[in-house]
Structures are given as structure tokens and as C-alpha cells.
Image (cartoon, rainbow, N blue to C red):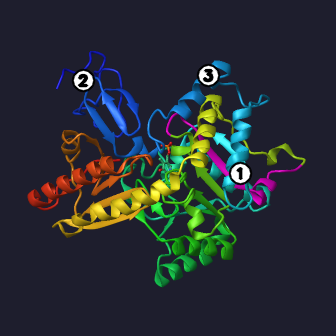
Amino acid sequence: MAAPPTWLTLDHVWLPYAQMADAALPLPVVSASGVRLRLADGREFIDGISSWWTACHGHSHPHIVGAIQQQAGRLSHVMFAGLAHEPAYRLAERLAAKLAGDLDHVFFSESGSVSVEIALKMALQYWRNRGEPQRRGILALRRGYHGDTFMTMAMTDPDVGMHDAFRGIVPPALLADLPRDQVSTMVLDFLLDREASELAAVIVEPLVQGAGGMRMHDAATLARLRDACDRHGLLLIADEIMTGFGRTGSLFACEQAGIVPDIVCLSKALSGGTLPLAATVAREHVFAAFLGSEFERALMHGPTFMANALACAAADASLDLFESEPRLAQVAAIEAQLARELEPCRAMPGVADVRVKGAIGVVELAAPAAGLRPAFVERGVWLRPFGNIVYVMPPFIIEAADLRALTSAVCEVVEHWSRNQRGAAGAGDVV
Ligand SMILES: *Cc1c(COP(=O)(O)O)cnc(C)c1O
């Protein structure tokens, strides 16, 4: 292993979710293409988690690179108030066409957390505009994660444990269990009967709760949640930031339950993992509540870099690829291979669960495990277990042999951990 490049020091850069007192130097990546990351010293890694769940087409896909280059030569960015550009307007039209029902009104921003903040603003102001300003509460689900900004921290289950330092600063959302069975459905109904007149919306990560532990629920559960919102007259916000764009097997997770949420949040894979971009998309009736002769009814939001032209051109190119290449079939093949190749972990002592949904494969350990990450680096794969979760979330273009390398690494590392574990071992790493 060569010495790290001279620019790589921690004198000035503050890393995410890291204790800087003893943070390891990150790996210096000089280029990436397809599923491979290349390091300064020539080593290569398979990106097994699509760089925080973004790079759905792999890295440096020529179609997206070309679109960004062309756009950069013409127009990188202009403010989005009073000025317009084709990539954003095209993208909005295409997203509206791909999303179910009358999810037709797209508000752009530049990160997932901000798109959730905007969704919450929309929900609260929707009720205010309709003469029910007392509806200010949001119901969120246990094990949910919705971002790191203040209101999104409030929507995140405190037990997910990423935001302990801010407990008491943001008022926590009302929390409920997903209506997975008859009892939890009754409990949810009871809660909504009591609280609905003060609630604006329910927020959910459809089918897979990501950073809260890669927990999966079935389409019927999601349909029951939609049904509960309808019966109690609440808006349903679907945070598809992780699940959107094919990850769970359909273009959007909500499709599998046949439901149309009132507001959808998109980000992560929206630009194919190339540039920061997010969108909050509202249905017709939500949008209509903001129309009127009084200016105060308008949505008061406008990020400086909203609808950045480069990011929108990248997202348009990403949608081209979903149309021209067999992404959903690739996800189905990944799902089958993950299910087959992770199955042996189930019998290992200390493994609590093995589960797969679309291009997400999870081995859940019975106890949090810190320190597994270096074992993956040694094996030439880029995986980042957190808490008690070891997971694989590859780019959809991954070939069977590379996916096999990822699943073999998971089985080996988990088996090694399984043989050597001595009771619970601390708190584990974070996302
Ligand atoms: C990543 C994520 C967010 C936050 O997005 P950022 O771009 O990191 O702000 C919100 N919700 C879900 C479900 C996510 O996976």
C-alpha cells in the first residue's frame, strides 16, 4: 500500500458522522467507472452501496457524462425565479408522467433533507390555506429516517440514534408503528382518532426504511397506511429518497402498493448519483390549495441552487437510461442473486435476519458490530455496515461475478464475526 497523497490530511476537512479525534483517513478515490472505484495507489474497489445509494447506473455512465458536458458548455446555472431553462421544465414533465396519478407539480431543491422540509411546509401550509391552521402535527413511523436538518430530525425516530445531541431542541413527531398486522393497525387507528384534528400529515419511507436499519414492510402495510390517512383526512408524504428510481424493483416503491401519496420526495438516484438534486412532487389537490388571489397562499420557499441546470440535465439523462436500458429487469436479477447468495448467513450464530428487497440485501446481526469495515476494504469491496446492519446496495448495472464478489465478502466477514463474537460489542458504526 502506497503512502496517502500529500493533500489527504484531516487538518481542515470535517468528516460526516465521524469522531474526528481518531477518524481514519478516508480512501483517496481518483476515478470511478461502472461499479469500480479507483484509488490513488492503483487499488480498485467494487462500490457495493452505490455511494450512499445514488449511483444506480454505476459511475461515469457515458450518456450522463455527455449530457453534463454538453450542458456545462451552454449553461451551468441560473436562478430559477424569473428565469427558466429547458432541462428543468423537461425533467418536471417527465417526472410527472412517470409518477402515479395526479402527482403533477414538481418543486426542485438540492438535497433530500431539504425536499422533506419542503414537503412538511407544503403539508402545514396546505391546511393553513384551507382554514385549519391548528393542523400542525406530523405522524412519523418508528425506525423512520428523513434527514439531518432540524424538522427532518424531528421526523426521524429518536431511537435511530443519529441525533441524540439534539433531543429536546426539536419537538418530536408523533410516532407510531407501521400497520403491519391487525393489532398495530388498530393502535394506529386509535391514535389517529384521537389526534387527527391536530395532524397535517403522515410521513413514511415506502417499503424500506433505510438509515433506521434497512427494515422492510410489505405492500399491504403501505396500502393500509394510505387507507388510514384517507379515513382520517390526512395527507400522506412518501419519502422515496432512497427507494425511488428502481431500488425496490419498481420505478417507485409506492407503485407496488397501488397507492398514490399526496406528496413525494425524491433525491439520491434522481440525477443518477452525479449531482445534488431533489424534488418534492405534489398532487393536484395539494397544489390547488396554494392558488388564490392572496399572495400569502403561495409556497414560501426558493433554494438558491434549485433546479440547477447541470443537475437537471444529468437527471434527464438518467431517465433516458431507465427508458433505454433494462434497469428494472437488472434489479429483478440482482434480487434473485442476493436472495440466493446471502441465504447461507441465516444459519450463522449471531445472525438475526437475512432479507432482500429489489437491489437491497441485508444481513442483520443480533448485536451491533463496530470495526467490520476494514475487513471489507481488505477484500476489495466498498461496503459500510452500520449498527447491526451489513448491507449491499449495488449499482443496477453490476455483473453477476462482481455481485458474487460482494456477497462472498459479506458471507466471509459475517462468518468470521460470528465465530469470534463475545457477547454484545458496543454501539456499532453509524450510516
Ligand atoms: C438520505 C435520505 C434523506 C436525506 O437526504 P440528504 O440528501 O442526505 O439530505 C432523507 N430521507 C431518506 C429516506 C434518505 O434515505
User: Residue 258 location, x and y as percent?
Assistant: 62, 69
Which of the marked residues, 3 or 2, is nearer the chain's N terminus? 2
Which of the marked residues, 1 or 3, is nearer the chain's N terminus? 3
User: Residue 413 location, x and y as percent?
Assistant: 18, 52
Local SS, label 1: helix
Q: Is residue 93 magenta?
A: no
Q: Mark 2 points at which residue?
A: 41
Q: Which residue lies furthest to the top in this view?
A: 6
Whether the residue under disc 1 has CB within 8 Å of ligand 1: no
In the image, what residue occupies the spot 70% across and 36% down? 88
Q: Which numbered circle lies on residue 96?
A: 1
Q: Give the range drawn in magenta.
A: 273-292
365 horizontally vs 301: left or right: left
Q: Quadrant of residue 84?
A: top right
Q: Do the residues labelled 1 and 3 touch (CB within 8 Å)?
A: no
Viewer-side residue, 391 vs 204: 391
Q: What residue type is labelled 3?
A: Ala
Q: Which amino acid does label 2 sit on?
A: Asp
Query: Marks 1 and 2, how far apart in space?
Result: 45 Å
Q: Which amino acid does label 1 sit on?
A: Ala
The reply to whether residue 203 is visible in this rendering is no
Viewer-side residue, 308 vs 158: 308
Near mark 3 (Cα within 10 A), the count class, few <14, some 14-19 or many ≥20, is some
Local SS, label 2: loop
Near mark 2 (Cα within 10 A), the count class, few <14, some 14-19 or many ≥20, is some
Near mark 1 (Cα within 10 A), the count class, few <14, some 14-19 or many ≥20, is some
Q: Which numbered circle lies on residue 72?
A: 3
Query: Marks 1 and 3, how far apart in space?
Result: 25 Å
Query: Marks 3 and 2, how far apart in space?
Result: 30 Å
90 horizontally vs 391: left or right: right
Task: Tell me: residue 105, above or below residue 81.
Answer: below
In the image, what residue occupies the spot 56% across and 39% down? 271
